[in-house]
Image (cartoon, rainbow, N blue to C red):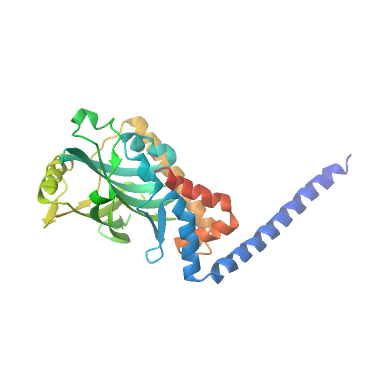
Amino acid sequence: MDNLYYVIPAIIALLIIVLIIFFNFKKKSVIRKVDSLTTPEKNQILDTLAKPVGYNYDPYQDIFTTRHDAPQKVFGYTTLYNLAAPFFNMIFDYETIYFNYNSRTWLIEMWKGQYGINIGCELGIYYADRILEPEEYDFALFKAVDSKDMLDISLKLNQHSKNKPYKYTKLAHLRDKHWWLTGFKMGYFSKPHHLFVNTGITFKDYRMMQSFLESFEQTMPDTPYKTSGLTVYFTFYKSNRKYPFFKKAVRSIALLSCHAYCKLFNFVTKPFKKSGDKLLYLYYFLPFATKRIFRVKHHK
């Protein structure tokens, strides 16, 4: 019996050594596998991983963007999504512009912030099936616009330097005719107010643009804008929303969690620099972790 006190620790130590050797061998093997892939092969695998949850991989900017046929389209939009977001580790600034056009209440919403281990921005376009009263806005379920009603959108996501507020890093440049244009950069962390988005929206006609601007001026009175033809340009710097103590606490805890996960992600994948390569490394080394990453995006 006394020998067990020596044998059991020795067995445990041996198992730990074997596991370390195994994982070190597997790590080197996975690194070689990722390095051996050609760029088209990498892009094809990443697109295959992202497609079921509604995203494409952009290898030129090393970001993920929304597909036109993203499955999230069928769920539309309601304010409940924003309220629930912090509980799924999504902490963002957002602003909602409601306006009436062609016998419908339209909604254009902008988001920017931290989405799990990603930083990103979004602009979605939705409408109701009729003109809504303002008191109905917070409870209505809006439908994503049909293809014929999608608008040309441009988004430039930038991040302020923490120590040099007048300097910033360009993270993504998006332009498309879309119902929900997004850009997500994996493995980056930022507080939402350190991000800003240069935005351009081209409307269907002058009447639609004017209806949007009337609401925009009321919702974001401190945000300057300019127009060129049917396009409105502005920069989304910050949200005017005020949060009670409980919501602030939930957001802060979620943001700390995102920061920790982001550091862990970059530590585990440190052999690589590009987000696409990091994800492929996880895909081959820790498949369950890869599924978890895309589950965070899928909640949106």
Instruction: Return the x and y of residue 185 as percentages of the image width and height.
Output: 39, 56
Looking at the rendering, which quadrant does residue 103 occupy?
top left
Question: x%, y% of residue 23?
Answer: 66, 58
What is the tally of numbered marks visible in this picture? Answer: 0
261 or 83: which is nearer to us?
A: 83
Extreme residue toward the top, this view: 135
Q: In which quarter of the image is the C terminus?
A: top left
Quadrant into which the N terminus falls: top right
| Residue 27 horizontal/vertical position (percent) | 62, 62
User: Left of 13 or right of it: where is 34?
Assistant: left
State the image coordinates of residue 231 (x, y, percent, origin top left): 16, 55
Tell me if residue 283 comes above or below residue 84 in the rendering: below
Query: In the depicted view, which residue is nearer to us: 66 or 292?
Result: 66
For the residue pair 175 and 10, the one nearer the viewer reads as: 175
Q: Residue at x 78, y 47 (%)?
A: 9
Q: Is residue 157 above or below residue 244?
A: below
Q: Compared with residue 292, is residue 83 higher up or lower down, i.e. above or below? A: above
Camera sees residue 96: yes
Q: Residue at x 83, y 46 (%)?
A: 6
Q: Residue at left 26%, top 35%? A: 242
Front residue (pair 112, 243): 112
**Apparent side of residue 58 relative to residue 98 in the rendered image (left or right):** right
